[in-house]
Image (cartoon, rainbow, N blue to C red):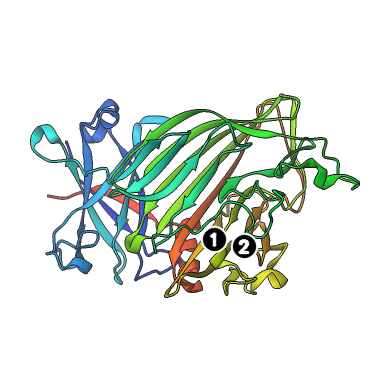
Amino acid sequence: MTQRLIFEVAAPAGAATSEETLLNAIIDLGSLGIEPAHIDRRRVGFWMQERLADDRQGYGRGSVRSGQPQGLPLAAQVELKADAPDRAILTWLAPPRSTWPRRFVLDMAEPSAGRPLPFPQVQIWPDAHDRVWVTHDGRKLLGYCYSAQYPKPFFYPVIGPSGRPLTRLGHPRDFDGGHDHHRSLWIEHENVNDVCFETEHLHFFAGSDSPLVGIGRIAQRKFLKQEDGPVYARLEMELDWISHSGEALLSEIRRVRIYPLAGREQLIDFDLTFRPRVERVTFGRSTFGILAARVAHSLEVTRAGGRVCTARGGLNEAELHRRPAEWCDYAGPITPDETNGLAIFDHPDNIHHPAIWHVRDDGWMCVAPFAREAVTLRGDESLQLRYRVFAHAGDDTARIASQYADFAYPPAVTRRALQR
């Protein structure tokens, strides 16, 4: 390593002094004497060491709660930039601290030199029947099912801090199968070139003025990445949106990162890129799609004492349905003594931000970027959408707002060479 770097971090927009903060920085591998291939082969890795104002070493992640001594490093994860493989994205979770700005020194881990790598505590476990699990220290966080027996892939279950699922399969009071497509947490859209990629029952539209002509399916073509890590796990997959006649209308690259937090909470980041496979693809105007969730029965407003709220205020379906907001949160009792919730964040770079929300008191929540107007892609055009899901304890809306601010407006990180 030819030089050491120090990263200076400005105060987060959310001013979350009691929360962990997810931080990112770009590093130049050449200036550090590192070959990009060494990253992929795990020959090198990184730790971050916080420097306090009096130049003491700060606590590592979790050390304050566990009573461990100062000086413990923070695991960092590095990911090569797709458009510049000689540069990489460095990611770490900073423990709570009330004093900002903060400073972190980068230290290289190199097993050949006796400096161990951060252990990949966040792991992907392949399972039977076309399912993978994302785990943290052996504890399941999230399941992903991509079996061709279903019309579209889905994420089930999403495990909350209580250790219980925050999502469910299907409507709890619909026994005729009309809501079979409500599978936990999933990507969908009601109308793509007049083909429905939402419901699985076209007879719902019989006798109406709907333009829909058939039911499509979303098929996973292949995995592009399955990556374990000390900070997050990464899934990347390529999918086709196929019409009822077998024509591939859309190609989707779905990038998902799962970050375990303290207190068994988690962040799930979705980065979706759509490209047409035909001359023209139109996402029709609809409030059904693009990211939807069916929450656990006990979180429902209707019968279970849960609540839905958004960044714009208001409460539950009567005040929130078909209205815009930066985020939406569904929370309620998950055990007799615990409240958990699931929040979805709409990134400010997304088209038609802030999105319209389709919410129901019976446990349904959907962020709808195409609710105001249709969007058409032609030729080599593409559309990128970014969302974050926060599986959290409690129902404190101030915490949700703070987490959203960190997603939408992350703290600025500047780097410089460390003076010796």
User: Closer to the camera, 118 or 408?
Assistant: 118
Residue 253 locus on image (x, y percent): 54, 34
With 100 as the anchor, is 271 left or right in this view?
right
Q: What element carries label 2?
A: loop
Q: Is residue 378 above or below residue 286?
A: above
Q: In this view, does 61 lie above or below 302?
A: above
The residue located at (43%, 48%) in the rendering is 142
Q: Which quadrant holds residue 410?
A: bottom left
Q: What element carries label 1?
A: loop
Image quarter where the N terminus lies is top left
Q: Which quadrant holds residue 188?
A: top right
Kindly indicate whether the residue at mark 1 contacts the one at mark 2 (C-beta within 8 angstroms).
Answer: yes
Q: Name the residue under label 2.
A: 363
Picture disc at residue 397: none
The residue located at (49%, 67%) in the rendering is 400
With 12 as the anchor, is 74 left or right in this view?
left
User: Closer to the camera, 101 or 276?
Assistant: 276
User: Closer to the camera, 197 or 24?
Assistant: 197
Query: Is residue 82 shown to the viewer in this render?
Result: no
Residue at mark 2 to residue at mark 1: CA–CA distance:
7 Å
Q: Which quadrant holds residue 119?
A: top left
Amino acid at dot 2: Gly
Amino acid at dot 1: Ala
Residue 52 locus on image (x, y percent): 20, 65
**Label 2 CA crowd tier, 10 Å (few <14, some 14–19, many 20+):** many
The residue located at (35%, 60%) in the rendering is 264
Residue 315 locus on image (x, y percent): 64, 74
**Label 1 CA crowd tier, 10 Å (few <14, some 14–19, many 20+):** many
Q: Name the residue under label 1.
A: 296
Residue 143 locus on image (x, y percent): 45, 45
- The outermost residue toward the front is 175
Could you tell which of marks 2 and 1 lies nearer the N-terminus? 1
